[in-house]
Amino acid sequence: MKETILPIIKNKLISTVFQPIYNIQQKEIIGYEALTRGPKNSHLYSPEALFQAAKQCGLLSELELLCREKAITRFVELKLSGKLFLNICLNVMLNKDHPYGETIKLVEKSGLSAQQVVIEISEKSPFPDSDILLKALNKYRQFGFDIAIDDVGAGYSGLKQWSYLRPNIVKIDRYFIDQCDQDIMKQKFLKILFELGTISNADIIAEGIETKGEFELLRSLGMVYAQGYYLARPSELPQRDYPQLTSNFTDSKNHTDSDAA
């Protein structure tokens, strides 16, 4: 496996796709989430397979730095508006051998500012000791990056981490979005999350929206920021305008998005 993943990293054989994030009240794009793809027509095209292979070979840190470099460079090349959302692996962030300050160097080299970049961390993986994580995130904050917690509600730590880490942005786990227009319990939970966003001064992003019903229900609950296939698919040449929302997206179960960046 190492003979396969090493040339990919060395020769930078990955690509970045971007998915827009919208302010549905202003009907404008507020930023783009960067997502990584491996070599096309390869079993490592999927980000899940690519990152798993890198992890098994002890090359996760090298792959993630390459992903950040590619995402930042391409964001600038495309002259995309708003903020760039970069997913950061907790294992890499807290690895003592991972080079410190590389992200800010890449950002400044590209001509962007830290204020244009959001660092996303996922709640799908077990969070380490809160103090250790807070210290790591504060290093990013000192540079001027915003912090987002992704997949809130997925498990492990949830509201406790939200309260302690005080992120600028919270992204709701897809589980609570899926068919929320047909589930009273999910609707009540979502309403609470939007209210907590107001209380904690955090922007709440509903991601993974795939149908008109989900979108309309979320909007009725107070959603301002939205992301998902119903609005726009990830693409190497992403949408730059607010979409015409005329019909349901029906092929919702066959996508392969990942929060790997």
Image (tube, grey):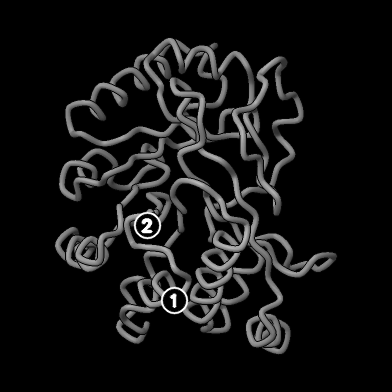
Report x, y in % for residue 211.
64, 21
Report x, y in % for residue 57.
57, 83
Q: Is residue 26 left or right of residue 41?
A: left
The three-letter amino acid code for the residue at tag 2 is Ile
The three-letter amino acid code for the residue at tag 1 is Lys
| Residue at point 64%, 61% (across, down) | 16
Residue that mark 2 sits on: 119
Is residue 93 or residue 176 the one in the foreground? Answer: 93
| Residue at point 37%, 22% (across, down) | 190
| Residue at point 62%, 16% (across, down) | 212
As drawn, 192 above or below 160: above
Quadrant of the image occupied by residue 56: bottom right
As drawn, 248 above or below 138: above
As drawn, 156 above or below 180: below
Quadrant of the image occupied by residue 17: bottom right
Is residue 185 or residue 74 the one in the foreground? Answer: 74
Q: Earlier in the sequence, mark 2 or mark 1?
A: 1
Q: Is residue 72 left or right of residue 42?
A: left
Q: Secondary structure at mark 2?
A: strand
**Marks 2 and 1 close (CB-CB < 8 Å):** no
Res. 109 mark:
1
Q: Secondary structure at mark 1?
A: helix
Q: Is residue 40 visible?
A: yes
